[in-house]
Image (cartoon, rainbow, N blue to C red):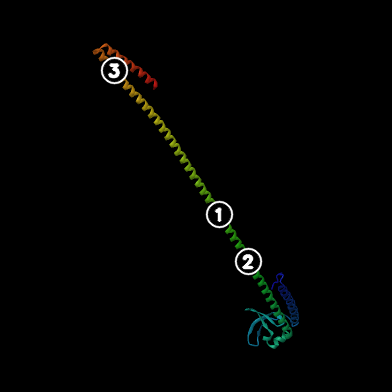
Amino acid sequence: MPCEPTYNAAVRNACFGLLLTGLLSIALGIELGAQASSLGPVPVPEDFKTVDGKEYKDATVSRVEPDGLVLTTKFGISKVYFVELPKEVQERFHYDAAKAAQFTTVQQASIAESNVAVAAQQQQKAQERQRQAAAIAQQRQQAQEQQRQADAIAMQQEAQQAQQQQRYALQQQHKAAARQAAEQWRLRQVAGAAASQRAQEDQRIDRENRRNLENMQREQALWNQQQRVEWARQHESRESYKRELEQQKQLHWGEGNSATAY
């Protein structure tokens, strides 16, 4: 299996074991290959039968390993261990139980180390996933906190804007009330001025009416006096006539003084 660079000691040891196992397998394979080459040309496809009766028809030996044969058939590639094959096949391929056991031990150790390396890599991947999940959770939490702060700021700004609008509406109401009060005061002033002007006009008319009435009364009194003078002149003595004439002069003098007073 591929060995990726890592700082984990277990993974390094596993990779080193895999490398050692591979080198040992190559060495054993070369040795067995050399032994097989001494047997002659590459064998043609043949039949193999295990001690328990299982058969491999038209099988070609693709590789000889210390503990068995790797066979290629029309069904695929299979490995048959020497302990499953007859003794003559074991002797033919120079089976050595000690080398096979050593090879098996090395393979098992390699598999174990490989499993350790795989477990270590899986653990590292799990830790990395946990770290990434924690980072994502932290980022999500930070994003939520930022969103919460942004929402709070937006709500605060909306509240401030609502307060400003309310203050503006109150100011407009106060201005409207002030304008209305000023208009009412102006109308009262205009109405007061008009009423004062009407009162003055009424007083002027009243004075003029009284003056006209007095003039009419004087004119009536004068006319009456003239009638009496005329009647006295005609029917009474001259003394009476003079007396009436004197009263008439007094009336004329009083009328002149009244006109001067007005």
Q: List the residue tagged with mark 1.
A: 156
Kindly state the secondary structure of the residue where label 3 is placed.
Answer: helix
Q: List the residue tagged with mark 3.
A: 225
Above or below 175: residue 244: above
Q: Nearer the viewer, residue 38 or 210?
A: 210
Q: Amino acid at mark 2?
A: Ala
Q: Amino acid at mark 3?
A: Gln
C-alpha span from label 2 to label 1: 32 Å
- Residue drawn at 72 percent across, 84 percent down: 101
C-alpha span from label 3 to label 1: 101 Å
C-alpha span from label 3 to label 2: 133 Å
Query: Which image quarter holds the C terminus?
Result: top left
Q: Residue furthest top?
A: 238
Q: Amino acid at mark 1?
A: Gln
* Image quadrant assignment for residue 261: top left
Kindly state the secondary structure of the residue where label 2 is placed.
Answer: helix
Kindly state the secondary structure of the residue where label 1 is placed.
Answer: helix
Query: Which image quarter holds the N terminus?
Result: bottom right
Mark nearer the viewer, 2 or 1: 1
Residue 63 seen from this side: no
For residue 134, the mark is 2
* Image quadrant assignment for residue 104: bottom right
First in sequence: mark 3 or mark 2? 2
The x and y percentages for residue 9 are: 72, 73
